[in-house]
Amino acid sequence: MRQQRVRLERDGDIAVIVIDNPPINAGSAAVREGLMAAIATLKSDASLQGAVLIGAGNTFIAGSDLREFGQPLAEPQLPTVIKAIEDCSKPVVAALHGAALGGGFELALGCDARIAAPGTVVGLPEVTLGIIPGAGGTQRLPRIVGIPRAIAMICSGERVGSAAALAAGLIDAEAEGDLRAAAVGHARQLTGRKQRLRDRAVPAAGASAIADASAAALKAGKRRPQVQAAIDAIVATASVAIDDGLADERAVFQRLRVSREALALRHQFFAERDSAKHPTLEAAKPRDIRHIAVIGAGTMGSGIAIAALDAGYEVLLLEQEAAALERGATRIHEHYASRVKGGKINAAVAAACEARLTTSLDWPRIAEADLVIEAVFEELGVKQQVFQRIDALSRPGAVLASNTSYLDLDAIAAATSRPQDVIGLHFFSPANVMKLMEIVRGKASAPDALATGLAVGRKLKKLPVLTGNAFGFVGNRLYAAYRRQCEFMVEEGASPEQVDAALEAFGFAMGPFAVADLSGLDIAWRMRQAQVATRDPAARYVHIADRLCETGRLGRKTGAGYYRYPEGASRPQVDPAVAALIAKARSDKGIAPRELVAEEIQRLVMLTLVNEAALLLAEGVAERATDVDVVLVNGYGFPRWEGGPVFWARERGAEALRADLDELGALSGPGFVRGDVNQLLDTKA
């Protein structure tokens, strides 16, 4: 027997139906059963004139229980619950607080009115999980906001705050004071009346407005099938009876929820949720962080400062040279000015953020900071000198963090007298935009220092992933293996543009050679040079990228890298000089080029990432297998709808992977280290 998750309380003649399914009141089978029983009581009890639906704890219903989505859904399903509410002759008011998302918001749309506490967010994010709203969201929302706005909201998974929701008519009122009392009062005002959204007409919209909204949604949604399906369901509201529309919507939802893409997106959802769990740090209390010092006012340092300002921290931006500091301050000011101009934030918010910023050349002011983040040039000697200075000036107990992307954190920490306070905070560029943040554990890093890094990452609205200290940590180690395999394939016969096209077709935001040109070929060149002393001389090494750098082709910043970038050209251009350089490199090694098709390019890349993931897990650099998928999706443009290499490996299975890795080892040549993929296949890893 399922545990009771819904209880009915009475406030005079109003039933207060309380959903109590912690921690987020997910819309599970037990919740649906409880709601059906409560509505049945409401209908049969003559002393009750109406009802209020309200969530216990901190939220209404923040979504459905996604664990149910991979199996047959238990009855009653959500459309049945909503139909019972609509068919009940007595009014039902949804009292929203915290979040009303997905099925939770669909349930609210099925009620006669919606009252929300200030700060509540509402939305239908199903498309981001590979499905469409399946309990009337595509049919009822357009009846409030119209078809074009419904397309924009549903296809983006937009979350709307209570103030904007009130202005749009998504809620009927914001509660002043006690939410429950306000909702009960509203239910009494509705006594004897029903005001169902299903009975409203869909506001008229021009064909061009619908077409424009659809085109924008498809472009932003990468033309994924669930985006098109959502558009079709929403547009149908103008011409299809609501019961037919509801039936069609549900059929599409049921089909999509068991699709591979939906399974991959749910895998990523759970992987991101699990990445925040760290049993070894549960007892560690984060240090109090109010004031952050950022050392280095370049692009990365400025981005980190913006992220910290947005999160409400006091920020001190430090530099050694006045010109560099002025450029950083200007960059931050222009960022906020552009956000205001674009309507992303209001001027008062921007002014408050900038007011929390102090720029200075006075390094002793580091003593004011609770957290110091170094963001200087990626060279070990430079960072060690900076940390010696930080150590001398920082207050006792301050957390000292390096934004290094691949250097040895322990070697950096050794430059201080307090390695226990040193952690890595690896931001991804642009730091104020990218969600991923690697929290690097040094051998001496104190648990509370690491817990502080995780807490700050969450406050910055990042996805903080805990990693061990190894060259490149998780992300750049994976990317180095990926890039290396792509270089192998170019040496074997593929062209850079062929590899890029194959991987962009797979779903990567950009191919590896276009990315290399964008970030600068000299960055990876420096990394390779740093590894010369430790590289296995017998290991296969491709010299093509080095030759490009030696000729001054460093990417977009020099107008040429793997591609040419003529002034005024909108796209990179294939360069015959690169083809000639590659042909000579093959000839020097006696390599006869072979043909590689897109499918082989994609498969070899995935196998390389799977193998490297297994090595990272075995070495303790990655804490759990699924962290690999979180890192690649959120930091490196891996297509979210493909789940990640660990998801791919689990789909492929042990026997096929063993044969695949035999082939990968033979192609990769000397220096290939084979990982034990069995631990990736363990779903508990």
Image (spheres, rainbow, N blue to C red):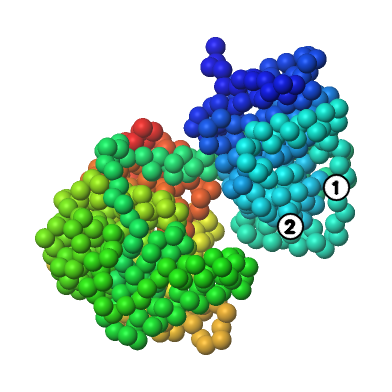
Foreground of the two, 393 or 422 = 393
The location of residue 53, given as percent across then percent down, is 67, 30
- Label 1: state its secondary structure: loop
Identify the residue under disc 1: 202
Horizontal placement of 114 versus 402: left or right? Answer: right
In the displayed structure, 333 sits above or below 418; it is: below
Residue type at numbered disc 2: Ser
Which label belongs to residue 214?
Answer: 2
Foreground of the two, 349 or 333 = 349
Is residue 367 visible in the rendered image? The answer is: yes
The location of residue 29, given as percent across then percent down, is 60, 23
In the displayed structure, 444 sits above or below 251; it is: below
In the displayed structure, 244 sits above or below 19; it is: below
Q: Exactly how many numbered labels are in the figure?
A: 2
Q: Residue 94: which quarter of the image?
A: top right
- Label 2: state its secondary structure: helix
State which tag comes first along the sequence, 2 or 1: 1
Which label belongs to residue 46?
Answer: none
Horizontal placement of 158 versus 166: left or right? Answer: left
The location of residue 669, given as percent across then percent down, is 26, 56
Q: Quadrant of the N terminus?
A: top right
- Pointer 2 local density, CA inside 10 Å: few below 14, some 14–19, many at least 20: many
Q: Nearer the viewer, mark 2 or mark 1?
A: 1
- Pointer 1 local density, CA inside 10 Å: few below 14, some 14–19, many at least 20: many
Residue type at numbered disc 1: Val
In the picture as drawn, the residue positioned furthest to the top comes out as: 1
The location of residue 609, given as percent across then percent down, is 36, 51
Q: Residue 532: which quarter of the image?
A: bottom left
Q: Residue at horizontal 48%, vertical 76%?
A: 333
Q: Residue at horizontal 54%, vertical 59%?
A: 505
Q: Residue 34: which quarter of the image?
A: top right
